[in-house]
Image: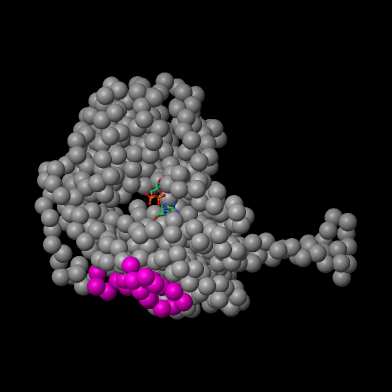
Amino acid sequence: MSVSPVDLSSHEASLLASVPTGLLIGGQWRDASDGGTFDVHDPSNGEVLATLASATSADAVAALDAADAAQASWARTAPRERAEILRRAFDLVIERADDFALLMTLEMGKPLAEARGEVTYGAEFLRWFSEEAVRDYGRYLTTPEGKNKILVQHKPVGPCLLITPWNFPLAMATRKVAPAVAAGCTMVLKPAKLTPLTAQYFAQTMLDAGLPPGVLNVVSSSSASGISGPLLADPRLRKVSFTGSTPVGRRLMADAAQNVLRTSMELGGNAPFIVFEDADLDKAVEGAMAAKMRNMGEACTAANRFLVHSSVAAEFTAKFAAAMGALVTGRGTEATTQVGPLIDSGARDDVHALVSAAVDAGATAVTGGKPVDGPGYFYPPTVLADVPNDADILRQEIFGPVAPVTTFVDEADAIRLANASEYGLASYLYSKDFNRLLRVAEQIEFGMVGFNAGVISNAAAPFGGVKQSGLGREGGSEGIAEYSTTQYIGIADP
Ligand code: NAD
């Protein structure tokens, strides 16, 4: 297929015109100190959607000034008040769901139906943490010796730097901002330069919900290290929470070590999707479609390695390829579109290079396998069979709509292959035998495991990985702990 350039509709143009284009510092939207700007593009046709102020290092420091100035009074604000701001923000995001969805589709490319799904998921962090804000329990106990007392309480960690990726422009922001607000932290948010519009619109929504000036500051910028460098070196910053690739996370951890900062790192993944011989194959294909194709495969939780028992591999692959081959690719705003473009031409080239190398190494493209002509960065849903176990495509994050299938002979073999990765974020297991599912979950090194489920992200669950997939958890009751510090008070025999 080919995709032709699309002009913005008047509705799209008026929505884009309503997005703040400045930096949010101390409750005011303002220009960059040097007047610099950068463009945001539509990945379905490469056209410019908007031009935003590009924060300088001085602007980043000004944002931290504002966060630092607001920290003490924000920490004293009643938990109920913080909770109510989050709850109002939840209501506003839901009220503005169509706008948020369209913005994400325009700047990131995902189909509108998926963007609406992200609004629901992303908004839920605001509601979940509005409920968690008032349930921050400490403890009071007697020492084992019997006289003195121990009092344990939590405090906000202090001003935080939040850095988010381009693939889930709303949810990655709410997953950090909501627990930070709930815990009483102030923050500087740096969205990804490829998809900052949703975060800008979300920041205005937080102000509309009553968030006081200086609590949330936003410094979109074309220079990521120009923002993180001075902030990580500033002793007023107390924490960095990062979602993105493992190489960048590693660099930020090294920089954060200078001031011994608290860090939360949500990094890359290389999820195995294991289909045992007793699995319901139709359900496994349905789950595989969700685990692979959500966000065009541009997700850290995306199934990357389909490990299928050799006795059912041919049947699973045929059904999976038929479902993948039937998907409709196009601009995300079209009602018929099920697969949007990848984020940019580099992403498309990287995906195709992995596919070509796998085919050269002996894999077969059962469906897809060739980039789509025309403007926009489209890649067709692809299923690769007979992928050699040492192929690069099984080692690296694919970040595209490509499913490599390989086989295993028994449970021990499946576990060994699943663990043969430096990543340990999401994993998916399909079997009708619950004991087997639990037994395998015990032995695989992943922070998250889906049992007969292709989508497992939920605001109430602790999201995060082990090994080089990162440190810390977002969501659940664990999410707020990332933004709290523990103080112990020893009380002499009262
Ligand atoms: P990226 O690491 O290139 O960028 C992430 C963010 O870091 C962006 O805001 C970017 O501007 C910023 N950044 C880049 N270089 C920087 C530097 N030197 N200093 C400071 N900031 C810098 O990742 P990406 O391409 O935006 O996102 C895709 C990656 O994110 C994938 O690896 C994916 O698996 C991962 N991801 C992880 C999760 C998770 O929760 N574990 C969720 C979504 C995405």
Q: Where is residue 121 shown, x and y percent of the image?
A: 39, 58
| Residue 22 counted in the magenta span | yes
Q: Which residue is pictured at 41% across the width and 57% down the height?
A: 224
Q: Quadrant of residue 12?
A: bottom left
At horizontal 48% and vertical 78% (from top left) the residue drawn is 212
* Residue 378 placement (x, y as % from top left): 21, 45
Q: Is residue 148 visible?
A: yes
* Residue 290 visible: no
In the image, residue 340 sits, relative to residue 179, either above or below, namely above
In the image, residue 25 above or below residue 355: below
Q: Position of residue 298 (x, y in %)?
A: 33, 46
**Where is the N terminus found, in terms of image quarters?**
top left
Q: Residue at x 83, y 58 (%)?
A: 143
Q: Which residue reaches farthest front? A: 34
The residues colored magenta run 16-36
Colour treatment of the image: one colour
For this view, does 226 lie left or right of residue 76? left
Q: Is residue 359 left or right of residue 265?
A: left
Report if residue 199 lies within the magenta region.
Answer: no
Vertical relation: 65 (above or below) 458: below
x, y (%) of residue 245?
43, 47
At horizontal 50% and vertical 41% (from top left) the residue drawn is 468
Q: Main secondary structure of the magenta part?
A: loop
Closer to the camera in the image, 334 or 45: 45
Left or right of 157, for residue 352? left
